[in-house]
Amino acid sequence: MRDASHRTPVPSDPAAAIADLRSRPRRTVLAVPGSSVKMIGKARGLQVDEVFLDLEDAVAGPAKEEARGNVVESLLTGGFAAPTVVVRVNAWDTEYTVRDVTDVVGRAGAHVDALLLPKVRTASEVVALDLVLSQVEKAAGLPVGHIGIEPQIEDALGLTNINEIATASPRVLTLVFGPADFMASVGMRTLTVGEQPDGYAPGDAYHHVLMSILVAARAHGLQAIDGPFLKVRDEEGFRRAAARTAALGFDGKWVLHPAQVEAGNEVFSPRQAEFDKAEGILAAYAHSTSEEGGARGAVMFGDEMLDEASRKMALVVSARGRAAGM
Ligand code: GLV
Ligand code: MG
C-alpha cells in the first residue's frame, strides 16, 4: 500500500486510540471539498491541526461518486501536514451515508482518524454510524473501534438532544457547531455565516448555542469545535469570530482558506504571557505542596490569591500551550 501519510500513529487498544484522538489539538480544522483534487493537493501542505475531506455539502449530488474516489485515492497517497485526517460523510437523511462509509473506510480506513457526521439530530444516528463502522472495519481487517466520530450539531433538534448525542458511542471525539445549517434551521435573520444578524446588537446571537455545545462537550470529556466563517477574505472578521469562541473555551474552529490558517492557530493558542503565567501558577502551587504531598490550599502568586480552581485553570492553559509547541 502506498502510504506517504504523516498521520500520527494511533495506539493499538481502541479505548487508548480514542483517548489519543480526543486529546489532539484541533485549533484549526480545514474543510476541503472531496470533489476538488486541486484543493486536496493544496490542503496537504497547510499547517492545520485537522483536515477533513468533505463528501457532504461542498459536493453536489452528481459529483458524490467521483468525490468518494478522489477521497480514497488522496487518503491512500497521504502526505497531509495535518496530524489528524477526517472525512465528512453525508447525513443519514440522504442515500449516501452507507456508501460513503463502505467505500472510504473499506478501501482506505487505515488512513482515516475519524468520520465527521453532519446534521446529527438524535443519538440513534451516532449509534447507527458506530454499528456500520464496526462492520466495515471488521470486513476490511481493521481493528474495530479505532475510528472516531465527530457529530455536527446543525439544528434545533440536535441541540436539544446534545447530551444523548455526546454519549451515544465511545467513538465520539468532539461536538462540532454547524452555524450555516443551524441559522437556517432556526430562521435567524442573516445570510452571512459567522456574522451577527442585523438588529441583535449588542449581544451575541450565538451565545446560547455555543455555550450549550461547550458545556455538553466538557460534561462528557469531548472537544468543542466552532464551524466556518464564510467571508474568507475578511481576516479581521475571522479573527473577531474566532476570538469570541476561543474566549468562551472552544478548542478550535474550521478554516476554509489558507488566509484563515495562521490566524486560527494563533487565536486558539494561548498568548505567550498567558502561558508563562499558567506555568508560573503551576510552579507556585507545586512549591507550596506540603511535605506530606497534599496541597496547602490558598497560595499567593504576585497579588493574586490562588486555590485549587486556579491550578485547574492554569493546567488547561499550560496543556493547550504545550500542545501548540510552546
Ligand atoms: C457547516 O456545515 C455549517 O452548516 O455551518
Ligand atoms: Mg452544515
Image: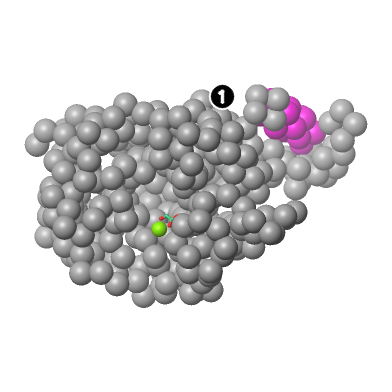
Q: Give the vertical position of 78 relative to 179 (above or below).
A: above
**Image point 35% across, 60% down: which residue?**
117
Residue 196, image x, y percentages: 62, 53
Q: Give the vertical position of 176 relative to 278 (above or below).
A: below
Residue 110, image x, y percentages: 20, 45
Quarter of image, res 301: top right
- Note whether ligand 1 is within 8 Å of mark 1: no
Q: Give the vertical position of 306 relative to 199 (above or below).
A: above
Quarter of image, res 279: top right
Magenta range is: 275-289
**Image point 87% across, 28% down: which residue?**
302
**Image point 79% across, 37% down: which residue?**
290
Q: Is residue 54 left or right of residue 18?
A: left
Residue 23 seen by the camera: no
Q: Is residue 93 left or right of residue 213?
A: left
Q: In what quadrant of the picture does the C terminus appear?
A: top right
Q: Nearer the viewer, residue 207 or 108?
A: 207
Q: Is residue 147 left or right of residue 236?
A: left
For disc 1, the marked residue is: 326
Question: Hey, what amino acid is under mark 1?
Answer: Met
